Amino acid sequence: MERLKVTLGHLSVRGDEDTPNKGREFVQCAGRLKRFPDSPDDVVIISALRTPIGKSRRGGFKDTFTDDMLAAVFKATLEKTKLRPEDIGDICVGNVGDPRASVSGRAAQFYSGIPDTVPVMSVNRQCSSGLQAVMNVAGSIKVGQTLLGIGAGVESMTMHRGQELDIPINPKMFENDKARDTLIPMGMTSENVAERFGVSREKQDRFALASQERAARAQKSGAFDEEIVAVTTTVKDKDGNEKSVTVSKDEGIRPTTLETLLKLRPAFKEGGSTTAGNSSQVSDGAAAVLLARRSEANRRSLPVFGVLRGYAVAGCPPDIMGIGPAVAIPELLKKTGLTVADIEIFEINEAFASQAAYCVEKLGIPHEKVNPLGGAIALGHPLGCTGARQIATLLHELKRRGKRAYGVVSMCMGTGMGAAALIEYPGPS
Amino acid sequence: MTQGDVEFCVRFPVHGNLKNWWRGVWQEQVSCPDSSVGCGTLFLLEIGPNGLVPIHAYDWNDGLFDVTWAENNENVLVTGAGDGQILVWDTTQPKGPIKAMKEHQKEVNSVHWSQTRADNLVVSGSWDKTIKTWDIFQTRSLSTFVGHEAIVYCVRWSPHIPGCIASASGDHTLRIWDVRRPDYAKTVIPAHQAEILTCDWSKYDQNMLFSGSVDCMVRGWDIRNPRTPVCELVGHKYAVRRVKTSPYAGNILASCSYDFTVRIWDTLQPLPLEILEHHSEFVYGLDFSVHKQGEMADCSWDEMIRVYTPKSLSHSLR
């Protein structure tokens, strides 16, 4: 009978194509951080680099085209990983404002020596474009289109800002409440969030102050040095004379006080609470993340810097689009079976202090876990770049902390959405 | 379950010339569905001009679960028996085994002759959770390796590292052993989340080990860094019963399964090179010929033994 039982035991598992969650259960380790089983088809991050973030219209990148910023991060990625340019399988560039984004991506690949045999595309998912580009490449890896690719993000808010205002709007949009709400300026959605959820001016300014202070501390301690690629470019003075400059530091960080912030005038609405001091800055910058199937990374002996463990995108009302992370992060945690306590760092984009502060409170995240190196209020928010930039900042900080940990990258999006990704730092190799 | 004969294992001999290839095959007879006792037979078969011809059959009063050819004597075979015995056979002797050694408390599921020139030892793995090494000229086992928490389904000597053994167990782990240290495994790899029925070393890379499991997967492991599998071959619909690496190409392996199929894999590709569906029951045994490139043999509970060269491997000949 025992032989019959043993043989029947061998038949207990049925191989089935339709088991997406097979093997996704945690490996249980009592009292320790939950651990996902590693698999050869995991999508892993090999490197995550970014340019400094320049001040729009006045900063070091004011005369730099998006393709030049992109080329800088592509080149740095190839140099750092020692990959041959032809080894890149696919490229996706996140961008919001460049009407020629796909062409810019193609040009950037050529400037950085990546041959024409390597394909490129662009994606626009508003402020999550940089993250979405990374996830598009991850998806391509998952379905076997490629084994290795770059997900990037770029934005020149100096050069591409508000062109869409000239494009005619379908009058029908004004007859549908939700469609009309997608046209509300972002600053007004911030006022809506502040009003509807009672986020006071002082709370917003305190949040903004923390962002500035943390970013200043991080910059001073050199915390950004490893993720930043210095870029040599040209700027024109007011007479049109070109001058070569090397941009190596984020330009938005500035010393301030709560008193100074509280004195600023509302920027979007009479009697409102959203000011230039507690909103994200208008900026230029680029970032690139190199992704690979784990088996491919192992085959090429590329050290695994991070592992993508989950991604969620969720919608919310367009007139309070800033609450996006408050809907996307719970979705992500549900999908992955983790809790807020399991996450070491939340990189939540600070489009506005109003929405960021609301999301953090709503989700019950301890403040010290959120944007420990500051966020977009201090660093700037080059729209299409931000998601990829956050991955770079997150992974380098987790690496500095030196132990295996989970981080979340999340942001709100215009038209009413939130995105959130779970990334594991696997620990020092 | 099944009535009648069921084949469990085939082995190409390691010696012999092209005209005279021996195959050691054993089978178990299940007398009735609820019987827990069967009889075993060790068949020797030869490929002649008219196909596969049985030239001798040795009966034993319990099932024979595995067979291995001696590396230093072309007439000697060792089998593992359901009654826990290690049996040594000499094909020049017409009757029974020339030696029987009983130490295992339960079925001996796996036997393997050492692959490195220095030592001529046999390793055995048993349902009693232990692994033992034997010198067939002695009467007692040399060492007993303890640590596995369930049935040891498969034991394999490393073809490269002297005195190194890999084992696969129902406790969901692969273990790597040093013959000098039977008290603990050198490496424990939690390789699958289900019983592991089989393993085999790469013949080209001394650090590569492959495992096949009830979870329907074959995984490849670099024993220096076993936290993640190096490759994962997914496709079998039921448990993988046996994996074998090709003696002719470092990236080729074959697996057979309870899903009635044999699959040929290139470990660098996610999909199998070929799926062979020439059996109508569980496929239990599988081997590559070391003498003729691409030739394989398999056996199944459908009582068929097949010797063939799969299409996907005949191409690589040229």
Image (cartoon, coloured by chain):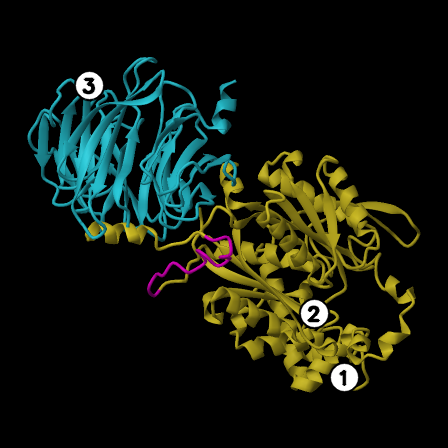
Chain colours: A yellow, B cyan
Residue count near mark 1 (Cα–Cα under 10 Å), binned few <14, some 14–19, many ≥20:
some
Residue count near mark 3 (Cα–Cα under 10 Å), binned few <14, some 14–19, many ≥20:
some
Q: Nearer the viewer, residue A63 or A143?
A: A143
**Residue at the image position 31 percent from the left and 24 percent from the top:** B12
Q: Secondary structure at mark 3?
A: loop
The residue tagged 1 is A272
The residue tagged 3 is B75
Q: Nearer the viewer, residue A63 or A196?
A: A196
Mark linked to residue B6: none
Q: Main secondary structure of the magenta part?
A: loop
Q: Nearer the viewer, residue A301 or B278?
A: B278
Q: Are marks 1 and 2 in contact (CB under 8 Å)?
A: no
**Residue at the image position 43 percent from the left and 28 percent from the top:** B250
Tags 3 and 2 both on a single chain: no
| Amino acid type of the residue that numbered disc 2 sits on in the rendered structure | Ala
Q: Nearer the viewer, residue A383 or A41?
A: A41
Residue B246: percent from the left, percent from the top?
A: 40, 28
How many marks do you count on the picture? 3
**Residue at the image position 30 percent from the left and 47 percent from the top:** B173
